[in-house]
Image (cartoon, rainbow, N blue to C red):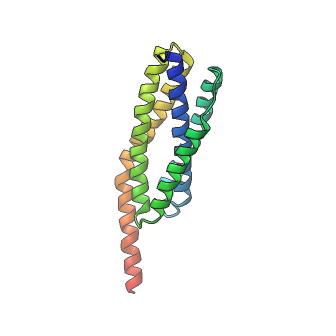
């Protein structure tokens, strides 16, 4: 049977792999959002937060005498890269990217909500505090996306209409 500490280590390793996935996804998305500076700037900001989250999770793992799982990290990065390649084939990539980021943020919210409970059960107050901080960052990003997806769609549609008008001239 698994101890709360062992379960906490597994959950932290999963969270670290999830943040590696997020890093790949956000980094690729930020590079291709040239026409949507508003979204690009916020994606870049969250990418910076993601790198900080990775460092915080790594410090929790180190304090517990463990480290990130290379296999889980690589699997997350491969999955994210696959999503990036698929996204690049869509004309409305900016819209699909915002939608997938919004969905991913909610998966992170669920993961960190559970991780806070696991850390509490293991009696690890420092990890609890760190995961609550990360959870708040994920909630803020999901909220920002929720408020800004409609404007992202509108900007995309206006750009499509503008290009169509220019092509008919």
Picture coordinates of residue 110, whole percent (x, y): 40, 33
Instruction: Determine the residue positioned at 41% across, 81% down.
Output: 166
The residue at the point 49 percent across, 55 percent down is 82
Q: Is residue 120 above or below residue 102?
A: above
| Residue 11 x, y percent position in the rendering | 50, 28
Horizontally, residue 153 falls left or right of residue 86, namely left
Residue depicted at x 49% and y 64% = 35
Q: Nearer the viewer, residue 111 or 67?
A: 67
Between 73 and 29, the residue placed more toward the observer is 73
Residue 45 visible in the snapshot: no
Which residue is pictured at 46% across the width and 20% down the height?
Answer: 118
- Residue farthest bottom in this picture: 169
- Total labels drawn: 0
Q: Residue placed farthest to the front in the image?
A: 1
Horizontal and vertical percent for residue 159? Answer: 41, 69
Q: Quadrant of residue 70?
A: top right
Looking at the image, residue 36 sits to the left or right of residue 63; the answer is left
One can see residue 163 in this view: yes
Q: Is residue 124 above or below residue 153?
A: above
Q: Residue 103, relative to residue 52: is it above or below?
A: below
Residue 60 percent coordinates (x, y): 60, 24
Nearer to me, 105 or 40? 105
- Quadrant where the C terminus sits is bottom left
| Front residue of 133 and 56 | 56
- Whether residue 83 is situated above or below residue 163 in the rendered picture: above
């Amino acid at each position: 049977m698994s101890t709360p500490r062992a379960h906490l280590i597994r959950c932290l390793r999963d969270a670290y792999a999830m943040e590696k996935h997020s890093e790949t996804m956000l980094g690729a998305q930020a590079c291709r959002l040239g026409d949507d500076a508003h979204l690009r700037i916020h994606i870049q900001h969250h990418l910076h937060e993601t790198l900080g989250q990775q460092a915080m999770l790594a410090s929790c793992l180190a304090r517990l005498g463990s480290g990130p799982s290379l296999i889980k990290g690589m699997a997350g990065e491969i999955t994210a890269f696959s999503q990036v390649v698929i996204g690049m084939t869509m004309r409305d990539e900016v819209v699909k990217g915002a939608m997938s980021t919004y969905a991913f943020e909610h998966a992170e919210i669920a993961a960190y909500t559970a991780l806070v409970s696991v850390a509490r059960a293991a009696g690890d107050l420092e990890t609890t505090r760190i995961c609550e901080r990360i959870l708040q960052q994920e909630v803020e990003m999901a909220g920002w996306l929720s408020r800004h997806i409609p404007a992202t769609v509108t900007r995309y549609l206006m750009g499509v209409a503008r290009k169509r008008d220019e092509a008919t001239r």
